[in-house]
Amino acid sequence: MTIRYSIQAETRDECVAGLEHLVASGLVPVMLPVQVMDDRWMARAVPPPEARDQPEA
């Protein structure tokens, strides 16, 4: 199972900003901001493929 990092925010702009932080730290977006229940926003990112393919220590 791949590790996934999620952003939950009250607004789309906050969600985009949070996703930008994850991308700046080297993660790859896999779910762009979408509106979910209760008018919240969510986005997801994962480690880049080369990091996922390395065996665990």
Image (cartoon, rainbow, N blue to C red):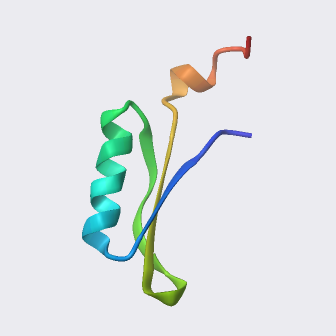
Q: Is residue 55 left or right of residue 28?
A: right
Q: Is residue 57 left or right of residue 48?
A: right
Quarter of the image with the C terminus in it:
top right
Quarter of the image with the N terminus in it:
top right
Kindly identify the residue that appears in the image at 61 percent across and 26 percent down.
52
Kindly identify the residue that appears in the image at 29 percent across and 48 percent down.
20
Up the image or down, 17 lies above or below 20; here it is below
Q: Quadrant of residue 16?
A: bottom left
Kindly identify the residue that appears in the image at 45 percent across and 79 percent down.
40
Residue 9: x, y in percent? 40, 69
Up the image or down, 12 lies above or below 25; here it is below
Q: Residue furthest bottom?
A: 38
Residue 36: x, y in percent? 50, 80
Up the image or down, 27 lies above or below 30; here it is above
Q: Residue furthest top?
A: 57
Residue 30: x, y in percent? 48, 50
Q: How many marks?
A: 0
Q: Is residue 56 left or right of residue 50?
A: right
Q: Nearer the viewer, residue 45 or 40?
A: 40
